[in-house]
Amino acid sequence: MKRQGYVYAARVPGQPLVKIGMTRGDPDVRLRQLNNTSVVHDFELEFVQRARDPGAAEKIVHGALSERRVRSNREFFHCTPRRARAAIRRATLASERGTEASDGPVPARGAWARRASVLFGAPFCLLCLAITASLVTLLVTQAETLGSVSFVAVALTLLFGAGTVVGYRLVRGPRRRPVQADDRKT
């Protein structure tokens, strides 16, 4: 069984090249190895992704970015850290599935999806919040006179409260983890 590891993207700040490599150990230790006396400026990790088979994932990334490679025997590429991050994510998924990585976009929330979420999510959130507030006010002020209807009012309050959360999540979008902390815990 192959050991798990990491595929990383590192670069020297201000330089147009990104180094994409792999390690089966700690990425910070690998970074210290790269920052030896033969380099003028230190590398900084741009992105780290855990991989079940980092060797296969690295090979897929290098193949996907082969046209951007500086030299065939080096792991340096003319690309942005963002493009490297996307390629690493695709390659990691592809290596775990046993498929090839396409050069298409990484599945992500696009601009239209964000706009639609804000356009529809914010009004939905506010509407649900207003209805929830009205129902809570009704429950508090009319608790004695409502009787058996209070169960329905409580259920509706909970339903519209949940709608408020859903609307908020649509506007806010999915939770994003910090790039440096991405899958580095063992």
Image (tube, grey):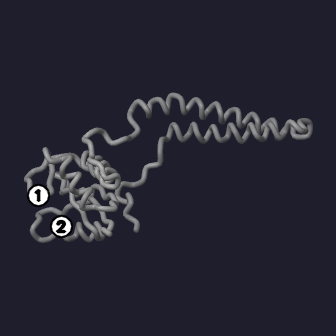
Q: Which mark is residue 175?
A: none
Instruction: Classify mark 1: helix, strand or loop.
Output: loop
The residue indicated by pointer 1 is 74
Above or below: residue 86 compared with residue 145: below
Viewer-nearest residue: 65 or 44:
65
Q: Quadrant of residue 146?
A: top right
Query: In the picture, which quadrant includes the N terminus?
Result: bottom left
Spatial CA distance of label 1 from label 2 is 13 Å
Q: Earlier in the sequence, mark 1 or mark 2?
A: 2
Q: State the quadrant of the C terminus.
A: bottom left
Which residue is at the front of the view, 55 or 130?
55
What residue type is disc 1 on? Arg
> What residue did someone put label 2 on?
34
Q: Is residue 151 left or right of residue 1?
A: right
Residue shown at 9%/58% (left/top)?
73
What's the residue type where badge 2 is placed?
A: Leu
- Location of residue 44 with respect to 176 vertically, above or below: below
Residue 59 placement (x, y as % from top left) = 21, 55
Q: Within the image, what quadrant is residue 153 found in?
A: top right
Query: Exactly how many numbered labels are in the figure?
Result: 2
Name the residue at 34% across, 60% down: 50
Residue 173 x/y as whole percent: 48, 41
Q: Is residue 151 left or right of residue 87?
A: right
Judge by depth and name the residue closer to the eye, 108 or 95.
95
Question: Is 87 above or below relative to 133?
Answer: below
For label 2, count other residues whose C-alpha is less than 10 Å away and answer few (under 14), some (14-19) or many (20+). Answer: some
Question: Callout 1: 10 Å neighbours few (<14), some, many (20+)?
Answer: few
Residue 184 drawn at (x, y percent): 37, 63
Residue 20 located left or right of residue 172:
left
